[in-house]
Amino acid sequence: MAKIFCVANQKGGVGKTTTSVNLAAGLAKLEQRVLLVDLDPQGNATMGAGINKASLAASTYHVLLGEAEVTEARQRSEAGRFDVLPANRELAGAEVEMVELDSRERRLKHALAKVDGDYDFILVDCPPALSMLTLNGLCAAHGVIIPMQCEYYALEGLSDLVNTIKKVHANLNTDLKIIGLLRVMFDPRMTLSQQVSAQLEQHFGGKVFKTIIPRNVRLAEAPSYGVPGVSFDPSSKGAQAYIAFGAEMVERIKTM
Ligand code: ATP
Ligand code: MG
């Protein structure tokens, strides 16, 4: 039985995709079987895993609309050694087209149930919105990983996400919980980073992951080569941090 995690934050550019792709590659290095689901029409996770989003025969879009099975649409990231359910701009249309379908917020959940036995982890890279796509992710998941930058505005908007997660938990998916807040793009030389980081620990306690992902240029360079940072430069500080985060997640699921 796979454990399914959404990587979500409705704020844009906070490191969701970088976290999804590199956690997938980090877990693969720890011999975990991983499926990365690209649930964002930007298709950044798809490209970052080395799959060309411009030439997809089947994608997350077709799976959500019931036009393809996950087994038909998934592809292998050779660079990352995990499977990918890829996406591109077409997925934006699903938002509207799903409105007319039955149990529209549970379509991803039902599709993933069929490949549950193939994986240890299924990671869902969500778009920067609390949309029907994100709702599908939240309904399918056992938990949410929230990447956050330790900056002044980081906590703003977090309450909207937490409230959405609470509502989904109450009405649609009683399994759902916040697994943790992940501090990303961390710059230890900045006093503000340290302050916000300490604040997060104070407010959220055990819900803050021990691993901290530093700001690291190798992680930012890797997507242009279609290779996860973890595989692109395994000895870099960023890669090492995501491998450590993978190990923390493997420990975490033992207690779930
Ligand atoms: P969106 O909301 O558009 O989907 P996102 O939350 O998925 O964005 P990313 O695409 O992962 O965010 O990251 C935004 C930018 O920051 C990218 O250019 C990425 O390469 C860079 N970045 C992410 N994490 C790091 C890091 N730890 N160190 C340096 N650069 C990073
Ligand atoms: Mg993204």
Image (cartoon, rainbow, N blue to C red):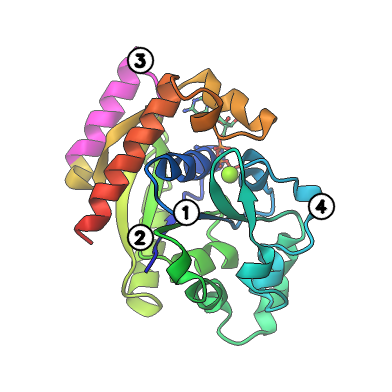
The correct choice, above or below, for 33 with respect to 220 in the image is below
Give the residue at mark 2. Answer: 143
Q: Which residues are magenta?
A: 185-202
> Residue 62: where, in percent of width, then height?
71, 70
Q: Main secondary structure of the magenta part?
A: helix
**94 or 218: which is nearer to us?**
218
Going 56% across and 35% down the picture, which residue do you hit?
228
Going 69% across and 56% down the picture, which residue do you hit?
87
The tag earlier along the polypeptide, 2 or 3, is 2
Task: Name the mark nearer the viewer: 4 or 3.
Answer: 4
The correct choice, above or below, for 219 with respect to 153 in the image is above
Give the residue at mark 1. Answer: 34
Question: Disc 4 versus disc 3: distance between alpha carbons?
Answer: 42 Å
Question: Could you tell me which secondary element the residue under label 3 belongs to?
Answer: loop
Going 70% across and 66% down the picture, which residue do you hit?
61
Query: If the picture is divided into quarters, which one holds ligand 2?
Result: top right
Give the residue at mark 3. Answer: 190
